[in-house]
Structure formats: structure tokens, C-alpha cells
Image (cartoon, rainbow, N blue to C red):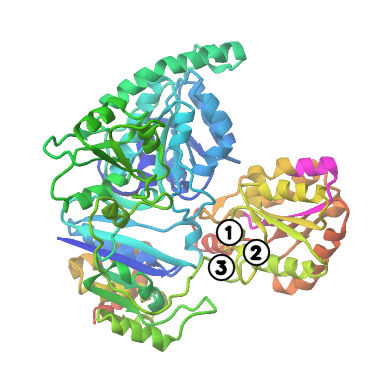
Amino acid sequence: MKYDIILAGVGGQGVLSVAAGIATGAMLQGLQVRQSEVHGMAQRGGAVMSHLRISDTEIPGDLVGEGSADMILSMEPLEALRYLAYLKPDGKLVTASDPFINIPNYPDEELIKSKVDATGAGVVVDAKAIAKESGNLRAANMAMVGAASTFLPVEQKNIEKAIENMFASKGDTIIEQNIKAFRAGRG
Amino acid sequence: MGELVLLGDEALALGAIDAGISSAYGYPGTPSSEIMEYVLKYSETNDGIFASWSSNEKTAYEEALGASFVGRRVLVTMKHVGLNVAADPFMNSALLDIKGGFVIAVADDPGMHSSQGEQDSRYFAAFARTMCFEPRNQQECYEMTREAFEVSERFHIPVMIRLVTRLAHSRAVVNTAPVKPQNPMEKTDNTKGWMLLPALARKNWASLLERQSSFLEYTTASEYNPLTINSDFTEFGVITSGLGKNYYDEAKQELPELPSHLHISAYPVPVDKVRELAENVKKIIVIEEGCTFIEDYLRGYLPQAIEISGKQDGEVPLTGELNPDNIRKSLGLAAKDGHATDMDIPGRPPQLCKGCPHADTYAALNEAREAFDNSIVTSDIGCYSLGALPPHNAIETIICMGASIGTAKGAAEAGFKPVVSVIGDSTFLHSGISPLIDAVSCNTPMTVVILDNGTVAMTGGQTTIMPSSRLKTLIEGIGIEAGHIKTIIPLKKHHAENVEIFKTEMNYQGISVIIALRECLETAKKKKSGGSK
Ligand code: SF4
């Protein structure tokens, strides 16, 4: 078994914490993981992309090839479209619906939505609403992990354990809010 | 001993710690910064290791040499262009009789994710005639670093570990081995080996040249340069280095036959193994990350019986990173189908954080420039380099660390007025002081703007080597007139007065310095949330 994910978003949106949640869950399940991160200049409010590879056998490389990703998981709809070449014909395009507009030429939101639908692979998640509901706007990322998790070869309990570990230092309320968002994201 | 999930950078750092280093020095630079950060963090809770950032890569390198001189193992870290700054001690240290194991970790940035160039540090190792290891995964980062210390002490040379961005910044599980005790402090008994007086340097140089054959013996025998021959398939063979092997390993499963293969991760290039491979194939495909280092050696200048394919004939791209896709292509495998959209997707370049002090400084500077027919603003390396992009469009040169001041001086002395140089506090302390001293010596009519945000922001908010409070004293000490050292607070509410200060100093026919003082937002946030840095 091998499962390749392209994570997409804008620098500062927490792409790394989404990757960490899934990666830690996979490792708790005894799977091998490779996770490539983005640091430095690219991180400053620009488009960022991270590769996450999960497998039950050795993973040679850090990068996912074109036409090879089982999933694109994006924190934002425009970024979801940017890396489509990586998505397998039968892959999933899981994206948050709320746009992150920090460029003057951000395309029409309806147009983006129609292009996501046109892939036939789209799973659009209102992560913002879920986060609000959970009582913590920052939990939107874990809502996205939740939405992705129904397709991942990682059990729910392992990802929840990973989320607990991630927020352990922030106290019980934050953990609960994030778990709540994660579960709501699973739908 | 145990299993840890580490970045390539962190695995390298832990390898050095477990190899028994006593000290570590470095200057931050993406993608190398997390090496020192790991050692620094470790040293907070473990007394035995001294770790510190330095003013620049040259000082870091020289400080590290001192540790080796007294017999201790030491690690020094920098990014590829940082090695240019440290090139003087680096090149010369190859002639020294290295005592305590000396390892220099250099992180290259193919694809220029966060750099102004794509240079390949393996050339530097060869230029200095020393040895270099090139790991391809986190486990090798750990193991090769340990081995590099052994090799350094065995051959009495500084040894380089070359990383690339993808490895530096990707995480995987690392298995560790027992920790080695530190070397006792013991000064070298061969100080002649540390004095490069011409007469002595000639001897040391001869000795280094003599030892080349033993380096080669080592790399030829090394398990880090594995050669497998498949004599049933002679169409082509493959040489990989670094991450090239990872992509090759994945793609080769689709090849009808497994070609003969040599992977090189310990340099100098193991010549006999290359020859053995060549005897078994009609063509060699070279897959290496960075420049055409191995390929150039293979090609030479004269025609040869064997065909060589790689970056020179365009089968592997000459610039940018290796990736699964371009390696598939070089092996003749078809691209895989993905999805596509007919929508034009606008770029989303990096930009300054919302509310960043630099944005306010640039707004005031841009307005001040309107008062002049023409003006020049040179700039430097850091977050503020993003001032080159819209909406700021505020700067006109970005060359290398510290270059803004010297370049401005040259332009002013060639007759252009007004000239402004914009440089961050950390970059100023790295290598901006010397050109400012030059400018004082000529009372060059120019204005230096020091963006003092109290941190090394771009690389993740490391502490600046000197606190803001002492910056002004330093500048006064160099000899800038007190009346022409101005401090501004880059905030919207001070905009009008800041514009006036810029205009006044740009009109002044001598050297002036404006310090734009306001903390980086990220650093402020970190402090508030109680982060240690
Ligand atoms: S990290 Fe700091 S210096 Fe860099 S853009 Fe953000 S606020 Fe500005």
C-alpha cells in the first residue's frame, strides 16, 4: 500500500500542521512516512506545496510525481487547482471552500468553484463554518484533516491520537475543539 | 539509541552530536538553519556542547577551526552561498593539519527556493581538494555525518557534508547509534601544520596532494559508493548521486531490465568504479542534483568510445531540482496522466506579512523618492528583498549579503545622486559594517537605511548577533556624524515625518544612516506566545 498526498495552501495557513497531523497518525499505525516541508522565503504569504507520502514499505523519494498523487489536500480553492497535474485520474481533490485572497488578480470565486467541480474529483469542505462551530477558528485545519481522513489508509483513532499529541501543550479545551472540528470534517 | 522523526537538517545535527562534537557554529540561511537550531536546542539542556550563531559564515568557520586546533570535534553550518563568504578559511583549512574532527555542513538550494543562486558545493570540496559526502535520506544524514568526523580525523582534513533543500526540509524516521564520548582537550602538537607561511604552506600543500590517493582509495572502497553490474544488459548504465538515486529507484521498477548502476555519495569520485561501469555499458546516463560535476569528469574534452547523457545534452534539466518526472523522462519512461484545468491560475508570489515594518519604511522611502528626478535604491538579502515586488517596487538591486552598501557607494562615487542603500540589521552585522567603514573613509554622499527588526526574520527569527540597543553606538563608533544618524519608527502614523527625514538625508552631501526601528511581527508573536527564540 502506498498513498501520496500533495498539500497546498498559502504560506501561514498551517499546511505543515495538517501534514503533521496526518503523518503522525500514519506513524502511530506503524506506517512509513516521508514529509517534505517548505521553509524560508517561499513561506511568506506565497503559494506553498508540501509532499506527504505514506506507505507500508520503504519510500525511496521525498517527492510525489505528476499523475501520481492519490489526493490533493488544499486549504484554499485556488491553490487546489494549481497542482492538478499531480493528481491521479482517480485521485481526490479535497479543498476548503473559503478563498484566501491576498493577490489583486484573484479569479472569480464561482469560476474557481466550477473548475473544481469540473475535475469530477472535488470534495469541497466549509472548514471555516466547521471551525466556528467547534469554537476555535484555528481548528479549520483539523476540519480539513477530518475531511481527508475518510479517504486515507489511516484509522480515525490514530489521527485523533496524533491531534491530541499535537495540541497537548495547549490544554484540554484546544484539544477538544480540534477533535470536534476533525470529527465534523469527517462529515 | 532509538527511533526519531527528523528533518534532514536535524538528522545531520544529531549525527554530529552523537559523534561527540564539543562545539557548533553557523550563520542562518535557508535551507541550513535547522541544523544549528537543533544543536542549540540540544545544548540548552545538555552542558557538554557549546553552540552559537556567529556574525557570518567566515567568523563561524574560523571559530570552529579553533576548536579543532585544541583537539575537539566541531560542526560548522551554512547555506551554499554562505560558503562563498567562508571561502577564505575554507580553502586554506584544507592545508591545515586538522586535529579534532572538523565537519562543514553546507546546504545547497537547487531550484532557488530561497536563494539568489544555485551553485553546487561539490565544486568547492574538489577545489579545496578535500572530501565530501552527499547523503540522500535522513538516515544517511545521520550516519554520514558520523563517518565524516572519523574521516576528518583519519586524513586530517575538513570534510564537507552537502545537503540539498528537499532533504534538509523533509522528515523521516532515523535510527540512532550509541553516542561517542567527546575528544579530550589537547592542543595540536604540530603548530607548523597550522601556520600557512609560504614556506610551510608549500609543504602542507604537497602533503595534501600526496594524500589525494588515500582519499581516492577510501571512496573507492566505500560502501557509500555502491556499484552493481548487470552484464546481461549493456544498452546503458546509470550513475546517480544524492537524491537522484531516490527518483531513479522509483522509476527503475518500470524499466524492462535493471541497468548497471553506480551511486556516488562519497567524493572524490571513485574513478575505478566509474571505469568498471563503463566497461560494461555502451552509454552512461548521469543523474546528479546541482551542476554537471560528475558528468564533466566523465566527458573530459576528448572524444571517447562511450556515450554520456545527462545535463549537458539536456536529457536531465540543467537548472532546477531533480524530481520524479524529469528522471522518468531521462530514463525514457512516459509521463503519467494527471488532471488539468483550462483556467489561468495567477501566480501567488511570497510577500511581506500584513503590517510588516518594512512595508511602512518602503512607503515612506517611495514617497521621498518622488521629490527627486531620479534616484537609486540598492538592497540586500532578507524579508525586505520582497520590496522588489509589487505593490512596493521599492528596490533595484539584490546581489549578496552586505552588497547593498558597497554597491551604493560605487554608484554615488560614479556620480549618481541620490543613492540609498537598504539593509536589514542582521545582514548589516553580517557584512555591511566593512563597506560602511569604506563609505565613511570617503564621506560618500549616500544614505544607508538599516531596517532594524531585531531578528533574522527570513530564516525563522533567529536572534540577531547584537541587540538593537547597541546598533547606534556601533555606527557612531565607525565615524558617522551623530547629526546624520536618525532613528525612525516605521508606522503609518509617523509616515509624514519619516518621508521628511528620508528627503533631508537624501539631500545631504555626505554619509548618513537612518535606522528604521520596529520589531518583526513574527518575532513579536513568538515572544508573546512564550517561544524560546
Ligand atoms: S517575518 Fe517579520 S520581517 Fe519578515 S515579512 Fe514578516 S513581519 Fe516582516
**Structural distance between the alpha carbons of marks 1 and 3:** 9 Å
Q: Are marks 1 and 3 on the same chain?
A: yes
Q: Is residue B244 left or right of residue B391?
A: left
Along the line of sight, the residue nearer the viewer: B349 or B522? B349
Q: Which mark is residue B383?
A: 1
Asked whether the viewer can see residue B66, the reply is no
Queried on whether the Cβ of the residue with tag 3 lies below 8 angstroms from ligand 1, the answer reads: yes
Residue bearing mark 2: B358
Q: Are marks 3 and 2 on the same chain?
A: yes
Q: Residues within 10 Å of mark 3 (few under 14, many from 20)?
A: some
What segment is highlighted magenta in the picture? Answer: B436-454
Q: Are marks 1 and 3 in contact (CB under 8 Å)?
A: no
The residue depicted at 50 percent of the width and 12 percent of the height is: B190
Which is nearer the eye, B347 or B498? B347
Q: Which image quarter: residue B422? A: bottom right
- Residue B353, label in figure: 3
Residue B453 drawn at (x, y percent): 64, 58
Give coordinates of residue B140: x percent, y percent: 30, 40
Quadrant of the picture in which ligand 1 is shown = bottom right
Ligand 1 closer than 8 Å to label 1 CB: yes
Q: Earlier in the sequence, mark 1 or mark 3?
A: 3
User: Mark 1 touching mark 2, by CB under 8 A?
Assistant: yes
For residue A107, side relative to residue A53 (left or right):
right
The answer for how far apart the CA atoms under marks 1 and 2 are is 8 Å
Image position, residue B202 (x, y; %)? 55, 13
Is B449 in the magenta? Answer: yes
Q: In the figure, A5 relative to B217: above or below? A: below
Residue at mark 3 to residue at mark 2: CA–CA distance = 9 Å
